[in-house]
Amino acid sequence: MKAFLRLLCAFGPQRWWPRVWRGGNFRDEVVVGAVLTQGTSWSNVERALRNLEEAGIRDLEAIHNTPDEELDLLLKPAVYVRRKVRTLKELYPIIYGRKEPPKREELLKVFGIGEETADVILLYAYGVPVVVLDGYTRRWAERFFGREVRDEELRNLLMIWRDTFYLKELHALLDELGKRYCRKVPRCEDCPLAPLCRYPHTTRPSGL
Ligand code: SF4
């Protein structure tokens, strides 16, 4: 996929999932981070993860055993805390002590888990080859292909390689593109995907 290679060359490997805890359980850290990042910035998530670490809480079992009131305070930077605490506690029996990945349908039954969070958990915590779709990716796709692209079609279009390095990097690189160039008001003139993208050729420059 030319677009993927262009993004990789322009931004370099993103190497997600970003770690915050020094030690602790990596899989659980991904799960906790994936829930906490809903509706807030990653810098807020980092602050909440650091609060947990300083309190000696570095896995889902410790979260499960911590009273909600204490978690409310520790996770405060990550907003919507009550809801997220409930989600994390409901995830515990599905994830803790199991080596095999949970089924996507199991994750989707958990309070507060939507498709994006479920797929982030499967890909980054368990290495299951899935395409993660989020707002950045959908916005990019509509502009890049020059038409509305439904989720199922987009997953098929992006599943070029069933390879976890590719899929992890793809999601991270498209998010980077969405933050730097393919914003609400796109910056096509500097974008590394401009030669491949339909959008700059189908819209007039502003002011003309
Ligand atoms: S060229 Fe413009 S519309 Fe296309 S991906 Fe880049 S910023 Fe988005």
Image (cartoon, helix red, strand yellow):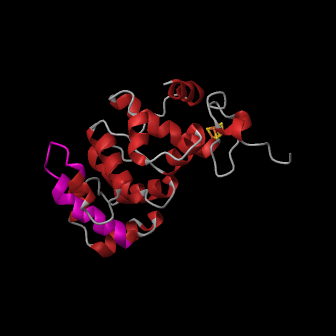
- In the image, 181: left or right of 102? right
Q: Quick one: 196 or 67, which is closer to the camera?
A: 196
On screen, residue 41 above or below 202: below
Q: Is residue 84 part of the magenta span, yes or no? A: yes
Q: Quadrant of the C terminus?
A: top right
Q: Residue at x 39, y 40 (%)?
A: 155
Residue 191: give x, y in percent of width and height: 67, 34
Residue at 20% across, 55% down: 106
Q: Is residue 50 left or right of residue 57?
A: right
15 relative to 106, above or below: above
- The x, y position of residue 170, in whole percent, is 45, 35
Q: Is residue 37 positioned above or below 76 on the image?
A: above
- Classify residue 168 by image quadrant: top left
Q: Position of residue 67 (x, y in %)?
A: 26, 72
Task: Give the residues in magenta.
Answer: 82-104
The foreground one among 185 and 11 is 185
Q: Residue at x 20, y 59 (%)?
A: 92
Can residue 25 be seen here? no
Can residue 115 be seen? yes
Residue nearer the viewer, 190 or 32: 190
Image vertical order of residue 143 relative to residue 167, above or below: below
Q: Residue at x 20, y 49 (%)?
A: 103
The prevailing secondary structure element of the residues shown in magenta is helix
Q: Is residue 32 magenta?
A: no
Q: Nearer the viewer, residue 56 or 7?
A: 7
Say which quarter of the image contains residue 144: top right
Quarter of the rendered structure image containing ligand 1: top right
In this image, 172 relative to 197: left or right? left
From the top left corner, tell me how far across and down residue 176 is, in percent.
55, 40
Q: Is residue 139 left or right of residue 162?
A: right
